[in-house]
Image (cartoon, rainbow, N blue to C red):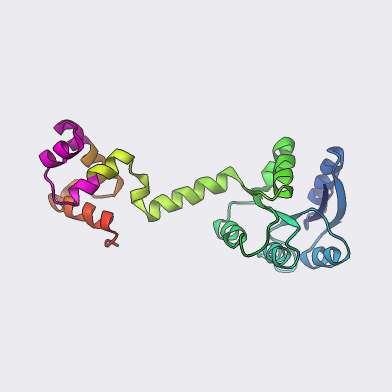
């Protein structure tokens, strides 16, 4: 596997290069900015590029934009983006058009993972094989945001069943009969539904209506 590195910190850049060489991985080039990376790519084709998100001159998203350029212009080159912090927008931009931007692998890792040599090298190998690799912290934040935006995703299968029957206008007794469960279980599931959908007790009987509106997708 041949790897090209783009990282503005000389210390980290050379550290990654040394780490990869110790693992028997060829380092095709190690550069300090996005423009140098794209120029180097014009001369040779690595298997994977390791790219820092923030690089000169503005240190905003030069690396990410270079990664997207690589995905579109060199679709056979994998890209593993490194970031100091979890930046969901960058992760989504990178993996959002995977199907339309080529068949090579793509990854997004926190820089802390570089020190975990086996994990880092495994991520490179997976990107080389054409897989998509996301840092576990990125996955956690994306899932948390998804659940916040769609509280129904937090419901268990049974809670969704209870809510579905509730949406048909059934009473607690009717729900129990439909799902063949006890009245106490129905009450417990309904309390969980209200809690997970963020419907406080002061909403009173309206909580059933609000829960059904969530289920039907017509609530804000």
Q: Nearer the viewer, residue 42 or 198?
A: 42
Q: Quadrant of the C terminus?
A: bottom left
Task: Locate residue 101: give its quadrant.
Answer: bottom right
Residue at left 36%, top 45%?
A: 154
Identify the residue at image location x=74%, y=49%.
128
Q: Quadrant of residue 189?
A: top left
Specify whether residue 91 is painted magenta: no
Q: Which residues are magenta?
A: 163-188
Residue 31 at least partly seen: yes
Question: What percent of the width, then of the height, locates residue 37?
Answer: 81, 63
Say whether residue 59 is left or right of residue 192. Answer: right
* Left or right placement of residue 22 versus residue 159 in this view: right
- Magenta-drawn stretch contains 164: yes
Q: How many marks?
A: 0
Q: In this rendering, is residue 174 above or below 167?
A: above
Q: Position of residue 139 (x, y in %)?
A: 54, 47
Percent position of residue 43, x then y: 88, 65
The spot of residue 30 in percent (x, y) is 85, 55
Q: Is residue 142 left or right of residue 183?
A: right
């Amino acid at each position: 596997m041949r790897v090209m590195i783009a990282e503005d910190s000389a210390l980290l850049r050379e550290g990654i290069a040394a780490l990869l060489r110790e693992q028997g991985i060829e380092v095709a080039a190690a550069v300090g900015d996005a423009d140098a990376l794209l120029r180097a790519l014009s001369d040779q084709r690595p298997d994977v590029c390791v790219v820092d998100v923030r690089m000169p001159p503005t240190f905003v998203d030069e690396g990410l934009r270079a990664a997207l350029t690589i995905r579109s212009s060199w679709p056979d080159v994998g890209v593993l983006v490194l970031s100091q912090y979890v930046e969901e927008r960058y992760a989504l931009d990178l993996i959002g058009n995977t199907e339309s931007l080529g068949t090579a692998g793509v990854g997004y890792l926190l820089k802390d993972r570089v020190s975990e040599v086996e994990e880092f090298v495994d991520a490179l190998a997976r990107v080389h094989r054409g897989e998509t690799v996301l840092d576990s912290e990125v996955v956690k934040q994306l899932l948390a945001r998804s659940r916040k935006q769609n509280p129904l995703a937090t419901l268990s299968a049974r809670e969704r069943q209870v809510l579905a029957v509730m949406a048909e206008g059934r009473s607690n007794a009717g729900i129990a009969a439909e799902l063949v469960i006890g009245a106490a279980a129905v009450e417990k599931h309904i309390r969980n539904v209200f809690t997970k959908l963020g419907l406080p007790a002061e909403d009173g009987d309206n909580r059933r209506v609000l829960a059904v509106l969530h289920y039907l997708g017509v609530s804000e």
